[in-house]
């Protein structure tokens, strides 16, 4: 599975570089806002993963700005829960692909349908195979935790550089 993941990520990274999308993706800072706009985690409601046990698209009328990104929620109640305790509901690694963070790959996008709640924390991934690997392969979560500080610093540095261009 690792070799298939690596091939997919190289293909995605190459395409992103050719299209000039990588700088736009990382310009948002540590929160994954995808390639266009400033909406966190593709507009999905982070609270719904916990309360509904499924991904749900958020609505613009239930939005909230946090850490420089706009977060959308399916209901006003979800928005209020997030506002009261954002760290409890926000995905780990700023909503970036947890498996990608473990591999040190900050170009990996996410599929909001590829998620896991592990030890009370939300992890988003590139695809279901990546989600399975991150949850079950020995040492993956430890690798992601070890890589996150450098990964985060790179994202923030790219944001700072893009603001000064």
Image (tube, grey):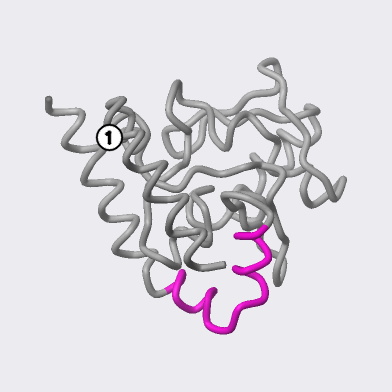
Q: Residue at horizontal 50%, vertical 36%?
A: 66
Q: Is residue 65 above or below residue 131?
A: above
Residue under the point 67% across and 44% down: 84
**From what the image shows, is residue 71 above or below residue 105?**
above
Expressed as whole percent of the image width and height from the top left, the position of residue 146 reads: 39, 75
**Residue 106 lies in the magenta stretch:** no
* Residue matched to label 1: 17
Residue 53: give x, y in percent of width and height: 85, 50
- Please, which residue is most extreme toward the top here? 61
**Furthest residue toward left:** 165
Magenta stretch contains residue 143:
yes
Q: Looking at the rendering, in which quadrant would you find the C terminus?
A: top left
| Mark 1 Cα shell of 10 Å, populated few (<14), some (14-19), many (≥20) | few
Does 52 sit above or below residue 123?
above
- Percent x, y for residue 74? 78, 28
Q: Residue at x 26, y 52 (%)?
A: 154
Please state, as top left, top right, bottom left or bottom right, where the N terminus lies in the image.
bottom right
Please give left or right for residue 111 compared with residue 25 in the image: right
Residue 113 or residue 69, whichever sits in front? 113
The location of residue 157, given as percent across then percent down, is 21, 46
Quick one: which residue is furthest to the right in this view?
52
Instruction: In this rendered view, identify the residue nearer to me: 59 or 7.
Output: 7
Q: Is residue 73 toward the left or the right of residue 95 in the image?
A: right
Q: Which residues are magenta?
A: 129-145
- Secondary structure, mark 1, is helix
**Which quadrant of the view contains residue 24?**
top left
Task: Report the predominant secondary structure element of the magenta stretch.
Answer: helix
Compared to residue 144, the image places residue 22 above or below, namely above
Q: At 37% from the left edge and 51% from the top edge, which residue is drawn?
A: 106
What is the tally of numbered marks visible in this picture? Answer: 1
């Amino acid at each position: 599975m690792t070799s298939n993941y690596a091939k997919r990520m190289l293909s995605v990274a190459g395409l992103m570089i050719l299209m000039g999308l990588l700088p736009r993706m990382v310009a948002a800072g540590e929160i994954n806002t995808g390639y266009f706009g400033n909406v966190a985690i593709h507009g999905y409601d982070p609270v719904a993963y916990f309360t509904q046990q499924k991904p749900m698209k958020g609505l613009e009328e239930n939005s909230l700005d946090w850490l420089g990104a706009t977060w959308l929620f399916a209901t006003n109640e979800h928005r209020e829960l997030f506002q009261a305790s954002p760290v409890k509901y926000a995905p780990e690694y700023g909503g970036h692909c947890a498996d990608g963070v473990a591999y040190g790959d900050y170009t990996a996008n996410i599929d909001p349908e590829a998620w896991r709640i592990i030890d009370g924390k939300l992890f988003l991934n590139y695809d279901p195979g990546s989600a399975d690997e991150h949850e079950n392969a020995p040492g993956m979560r430890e690798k992601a935790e070890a890589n996150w500080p450098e990964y985060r610093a790179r994202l923030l540095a790219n944001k700072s550089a893009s603001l000064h261009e």
